[in-house]
Image (spheres, grey):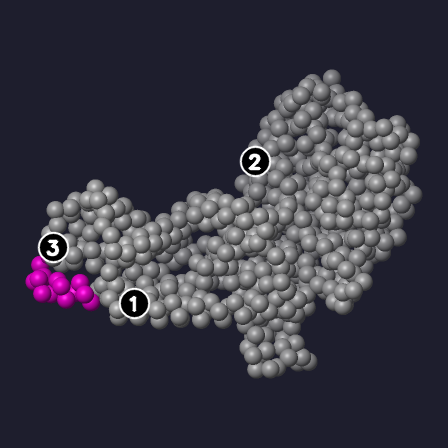
Amino acid sequence: MLSSFDLFLLFIAAVVFAYGLYRRYRLWMMGKPEKRTDRPKARLISLWAYVMGHKRMLRDVYPGWMHLLIFYGFLIPFVVVVITQVNFSLPRVLALALSLFFDLVGTLGIIGLLMAAYRRYVQKPDNLTYDNYWGNAVALVFLLAIFGLGFCVEGLRIARTQPDWVAWSPVGWLFSQFFSGLSDIHQVLLHRILWRLHLFLVLGFIAFIPYWRMLHIVTGPANVYMRSLAPKGELPPIRDFESAETFGASKIPELTRKQLFDLDACTRCGRCLDHCPGSVSGKPLAPKKNWDTLRAHLEEKAALMRKGVDPYAEGQTKLIGSGAGDGVSEDVIWACTNCLACAMVCPVFIPCVDKFLEMRRYLVLMESNFPQEVQLVFRNMENNSNPWGVGSGLRADWMKGLEVKTMAENGDIDLLFFVGCAGSFDDRNKKVATSLVKILKACGVKFSVLGTEEGCCGDSARRIGNEYLYQTLVQTNIEVFKNYSIKKIMTMCPHCFNTLKNEYPQFGGNYEVIHYTQFLADALESGRLKLKKSLEKVITYHDSCYLGRANEVYEEPRRIIQAIPGLKLVEMERNHIRSFCCGAGGGRMWMEEKLGSRINQLRTDQALQTKANWVGTACPYCLTMLGDGIKEKGLEESMAAHDLSELVVQAMDS
């Protein structure tokens, strides 16, 4: 049991901890309110799976198990010690088992810490480059001291009392050998000193959690609980355009409280740096480092506000800028491909897209400040409802000679084939649209297209930041869908798929939306579609960000490949959830890539490593970017990029 003095120390530690947490709380409250407490059952399940079960962390075997050992090595003894302060006794058998369990857990905790030290200071992975060297060293030494002193205290108790249960505390017995030669008086004195030092370190560690990098012990689990439960590919709309005075975020108070909380939830593990295409390709986008910059900016603005100074007055630093003390630069904001890799690998679910989206919205809607080439894209979407700027009256020209009906000609259908802008206007992707028409006919599906009534889904406009243009495009399409009582839609493009499926419901557009790979996989497995011709090639498949990470369609494309006779699939190192972006998402399809390496060429290099003949895609953007990557590297004779639908059509021929 703790003495009155120990309880007083515990009280002081709790006050210091609470005050530190309150200081951070005041920073979070600078943002706009955002509800993140709905669906408590789903949130508690997330907490159990991702915090207690380390579900995401264990995807990376070494660092995952390292953290798991440290986590439980500290948590279990702490919880049990707190519980046992209540005056009760345990049955001998249970007490002995608990003693052995404690030794095991404590040992594993020390092993975890040694693994962390080895990884950080011997292996030195690139994703830890931006970390505070001495701060991390202090944290490791601090925790090792807590674990080591715990075993020293146990060893002294064993050396002094020589209990008959020593076999149930093997590590404690090992430590007791260091103290067995001391006199009883010295053993008792040393026990009291080390026990008190151990208590001081534990209480000190707890008290100062809010003041240093260990804050994530509190904020990490809370962030998992408050994570977005919306579809992964869904972005929030700007509502009430007519009444809103500003759009997007150019100041800290224009971000949400949850977005500010994200900055303190970062564990600094660096997984985002490993998987962010902007970071890997040498651009200034580096999520972990960007969060550090934003956190410093937040603290600076809060300090000015406490002094009664306008934090964004003339001459003060800005949220978006490139000067010392500014938040993030425009280069960072525009480098994001919206690939979702950061959010999908982050153990505490911190996204980049939401914050950069709000900054893009401010730049586009408030300042008309965006990459020069985007101006033409916006104009093309406004005038012709497609980024290419081809006259909207030519949208149906791709299907000449295919005997395809439009909805105006035949509304009695099983599904609407939403072709999208790429399939309608891009020469390479027109071939994909043609392949899909042949497949739908071979399957006996009753379908139609919208023809000239079809408009751009708006994906690029929204992700570049032009929410006004996006919503205009959405409302136009929804009116057309409503006019024909559309219920089921099949898309060729994952960006159309994600937008129609996950974002149109925000505006009353609720439909059953499938991607063509889902349709094809089902048609092949049900026997509605037969493939006869053997292709005898080696293929690697590139997971599209908005088909894979955004909508978890991973296996259907692979089942299509496996159903094609003679086709052998080899996976790239980065596949499924860890696939590497082609570089075209987030509106980057329409922007020049001026900084760092070209992302599409990095992905092409990854495909080359498999020694495959073909790269398979299921996305018009990916097909374009990988095709360009192959051409840019002069590899047309040894490798080619194909959409999966094209390969299915080849295999259909007898």
For the point 88% across and 33% down, the residue is 406
Q: Secondary structure at mark 3?
A: helix
Mark 2 burial class by Cα count in 10 Å: few <14, some 14-19, many 20+: some
**Residue 331 position in % (x across, y down):** 66, 63
Query: Sequence order check: which comes first, mark 3 or mark 1?
Result: 1
Q: Quadrant of residue 184?
A: bottom left
Q: Nearer the viewer, residue 280 or 634?
A: 280
Judging by the rendered image, the residue that carries numbered circle 3 is 161
Please, is residue 475 above or below residue 307 in the view? Answer: above
Disc 2 target residue: 571
Res 208 → quadrant: bottom left
Q: Is residue 62 left or right of residue 592?
A: left
Q: Nearer the viewer, mark 2 or mark 3?
A: 3
Q: Is residue 187 magenta?
A: yes
The Cα–Cα distance between marks 2 and 3, rounded to whole angstroms, is 61 Å
Q: Secondary structure at mark 1?
A: helix
Q: Earlier in the sequence, mark 1 or mark 2?
A: 1
- Is there any visible trace of residue 497 in the rendered image? yes
The residue drawn where x is 49% and y is 62% is 130
Location of residue 234 in the rendering, given as x and y in whole percent from the top left corner = 67, 49
Looking at the rendered structure, the kind of residue marked 1 is Leu
